[in-house]
């Protein structure tokens, strides 16, 4: 079964980081720039997660709303990431429906574990705690 990460990411540097992490756990990456394309990238029955750069040109919370409204992607886990380690942005993203949110500083060490967490439920467990994020 083809495990897949759909990535709404524009930055080439982060596309490379994401692809390396995804390949390290035996999954494939599909990069998109528009959340409307996500449903077309799904394979019936194949495990999938979506990762969203919170610095997208399209407002990320609008992208999240589109993903949650589309029948094919409504139940798909969504992981967001952002540059600044800000507690308020993380809380806003979680309230908008993101399943997990990472700061870019912790992305490299935690993203592969999140991919495994969602693509192989019950397989890998990670520490739930993350360094405290500063207020605005």
Image: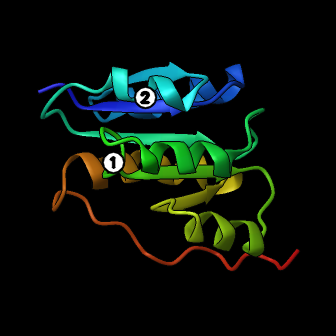
Which residue shows up at 19% across the image and 25% down it?
Answer: 2
Q: Is residue 134 left or right of residue 105?
A: right
In the rendered view, tell whether residue 129 sits above or below residue 39. below
Q: Residues within 10 Å of mark 1 (few under 14, many from 20)?
A: some
In the rendered view, tell whether residue 97 sits above or below residue 95. above
Which callout, 2 or 1, points at the residue further toward the start of the chain?
2
25 or 15: which is nearer to us? 15
- Quadrant of the rendering where the N terminus is positioned: top left
Q: Which residue is mark 2?
A: 38
**For residue 86, which quarter of the picture?**
bottom right
Residue 42 image offset from top left, x and y in percent: 29, 27
Helix, strand or loop status at disc 1: loop
Q: Is residue 117 left or right of residue 114?
A: left
Residue 22 image offset from top left, x and y in percent: 40, 32
Which residue shows up at 65% across the image and 73% down it?
Answer: 91
In the rendered view, tell whether residue 28 sits above or below residue 99. above
**For residue 122, which quarter of the picture?**
bottom left
Q: Is residue 41 left or right of residue 123?
A: right
Quick one: which residue is furthest to the right in this view?
136
Q: Is residue 17 left or right of residue 56?
A: left
The colour scheme is rainbow
| Number of the label disc, if any, that sits on residue 121 | none
Q: Are marks 2 and 1 in contact (CB under 8 Å)?
A: yes
Q: Which residue is mark 1?
A: 76
Distance of mark 2 from mark 1, alpha carbons? 10 Å
Which residue shows up at 28% across the image and 66% down it?
Answer: 125
Residue 128 image offset from top left, x and y in percent: 44, 75
């Amino acid at each position: 079964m083809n495990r897949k990460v759909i990535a709404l990411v524009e930055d080439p540097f982060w596309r490379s980081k994401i692809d390396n992490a995804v390949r390290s756990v035996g999954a494939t990456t599909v990069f998109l720039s528009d959340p409307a394309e996500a449903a077309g990238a799904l394979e019936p029955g194949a495990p999938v997660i979506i990762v969203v750069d919170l610095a997208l040109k399209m407002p990320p919370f609008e992208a999240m709303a589109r993903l949650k409204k589309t029948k094919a992607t409504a139940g798909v886990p969504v992981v967001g990431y952002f540059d600044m380690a800000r507690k308020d942005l993380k809380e806003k993203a979680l309230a908008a429906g993101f399943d997990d949110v990472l700061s870019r500083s912790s992305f490299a060490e935690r993203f592969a574990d999140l991919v495994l967490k969602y693509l192989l439920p019950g397989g890998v467990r990670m520490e739930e705690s993350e360094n405290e994020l500063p207020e605005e």
